[in-house]
Image (spheres, grey):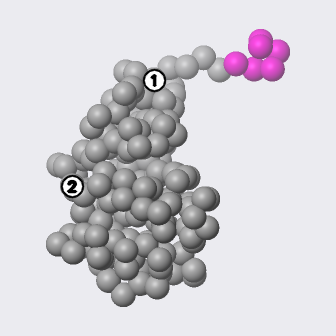
Amino acid sequence: MALDHPAAARLKTRFPGVALKGASFRGQSQIWIPREHLTEIVLFLRDDPTLRYDMLCDISCVDYLNFPGWDKPRFGLVYTFNSVAGGNPRLILRVFLSENELEVASLTPLFAGAEWLEREVFDMFGVRFTGHPDLRRILTWDGFAAHPLRKDYPVIGRGERENYPVITRDSA
């Protein structure tokens, strides 16, 4: 992993047997990590006195279905961290998941703010976060059977909205 980021060298030293891959684009550094090492790597990044990645900014997901030339698993989780106390540059961690392995450890025990972010990714993409204290839908209703931000979900939906009454300005 040839990446000019303070966390890259520390991670290589601390986790020599873990396959890490790094990339940088327009000043943003990202490190791809295996899903089975997510918790221990994030715990190290948070607690290491020279790194101190103490703020989980965002968790999102990317569906790479039919992406040209893509040979990796279909889904990519994107974790964005800031080092407020340590003053280090922003760091992005990427974890790739295949369609039949849509499960990863929850970061809620490490960062309380992960709770709602993980619920959104669960609702929109169907990724299950093991150990999450309250993993339920947050943007769609409980009976909703699909995950709307997946690329195989139709843009116009599957008829979910057609049964809702139209509320006009006069009737509101």
| 139, above or below 68, in the image | above
Q: Which mark is residue 161?
A: none
The x and y percentages for residue 74 are 28, 60
Q: Is residue 89 visible?
A: yes
| 75, above or below 109, in the image | below
Query: Would you call the spot at circle 2 few (<14 residues within 10 Å), some (14-19), or many (20 or more)?
Result: few
In the image, 63 versus 104, the foreground residue is 104
The magenta-colored residue range is 167-172
Tell me which amino acid carries mark 2. Answer: Glu
| 31, above or below 166, in the image | below
Q: Is residue 154 visible?
A: no
Q: Quadrant of residue 35?
A: bottom left
Callout 1 secondary element: loop
Q: Determine the residue positioned at 29% across, 61% down.
A: 96
Residue at which label 1 appears? 141
The extreme right residue here reads 170
Q: Which mark is residue 36?
A: 2
Asked whether, in this view, residue 100 is left or right of residue 68, the answer is left
**Magenta-drawn stretch contains 8:** no
Q: Determine the residue positioned at 25% across, 69% down.
A: 15
**Magenta-drawn stretch contains 168:** yes
The extreme top residue here reads 171
| 109, above or below 65, in the image | above
